[in-house]
Amino acid sequence: MDTIQSAVQECFHADSIDHGKAPRTDRRVLRTREALRNALLALMVERGWEGVDIQSLCERANIGRSTFYLHYPNKEELLRGCFDDLRVALREQAQRSGVCPPDQLAFVGGLIEHVHQQQLVFRAMLGRRSGHFVQDRFRELLVDLVEEERPANTACSWRAHAVSNYVGGALFQLLSWWLSKSRPQGPKEIAALFHALSEPVLQASRAN
């Protein structure tokens, strides 16, 4: 099983993750949220973001509309929840692997491997059918992940935020390019390329 997918599923069942007002240990709540998440991703592959509505989500997840609204006010917040879980899973995997120093974008290898294994889903997220909302939220996720790896002793200056947006945006564009034509390069090649391109920028930011 995809290690990131498995980790995301574990996040849905972790008592330490607080899902709004719902009791953290209520397994029915967790199962419902996982069913909705899976329904959203499947429908995005089939129909694109604009083709997904609340009724189709409920039908695919086998729940009523009233149950949906107990968990999320709209499909946009459901998508945010999916990205939040992915973010937690990537962080946990990076910490377990210990491959890179904490300020070397340790999440990148796991993310690129996950994108490779879930190409249909990520093409739906990053392709023409995804819409600006989905792309903007995914780009924000990447920028946040970069921000979180900024060394603790680095000042939160406008330059630091600019670098995070630059690096996160570059990663977004690289993934979009990689997925757009089913290019033959493997995840390790893409990760190595990204690290080689981003390292000079990160080094320059640390010097400042």
Image (cartoon, rainbow, N blue to C red):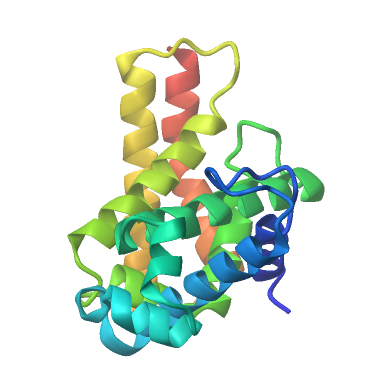
Residue 100 visible in the current orientation: yes
Image quarter hosting the C terminus: top left
Q: Quadrant of residue 73?
A: bottom left
Q: Residue at left 31%, top 27%? A: 162
Residue at image location 47% in from the left, 54% down from the top: 81
Q: Nearer the viewer, residue 93 or 11?
A: 11
Most distant residue in the bottom direction = 46
Picture layout, residue 120 above or below residue 154: below
Residue 115 is situated, as x and y percent measured from the top left of the image, at 51, 70
Using the rendered view, name the quadrant where residue 66 is placed: bottom left
**Looking at the image, is 6 positioned above or below residue 181?**
above
- Decide if residue 199 is in sight here: no
The location of residue 90, given as percent across then percent down, is 62, 52
Q: From the image, which quarter does the N terminus lie in?
A: bottom right
Judge from the rendering whether residue 114 lies leftward or rightward of residue 73; answer left or right.
Answer: right
| Spot occupied by residue 187 in the image (x, y as percentages of width and height) | 57, 70
Count of all numbered marks drawn on residues in the image: 0
Residue at point 27%, 86% (across, down): 47
Of residue 20 and residue 123, the one placed in the foreground of this image is 20
Please, which residue is most extreme toward the front here?
Answer: 66
> Residue 118 in the image: x percent, y percent?
52, 78
Question: In the rendered image of this protein, does residue 157 appear above or below residue 169?
Answer: above
Residue at point 34%, 70% (across, down): 125
Q: In the depicted view, which residue is nearer to us: 187 or 95?
A: 95
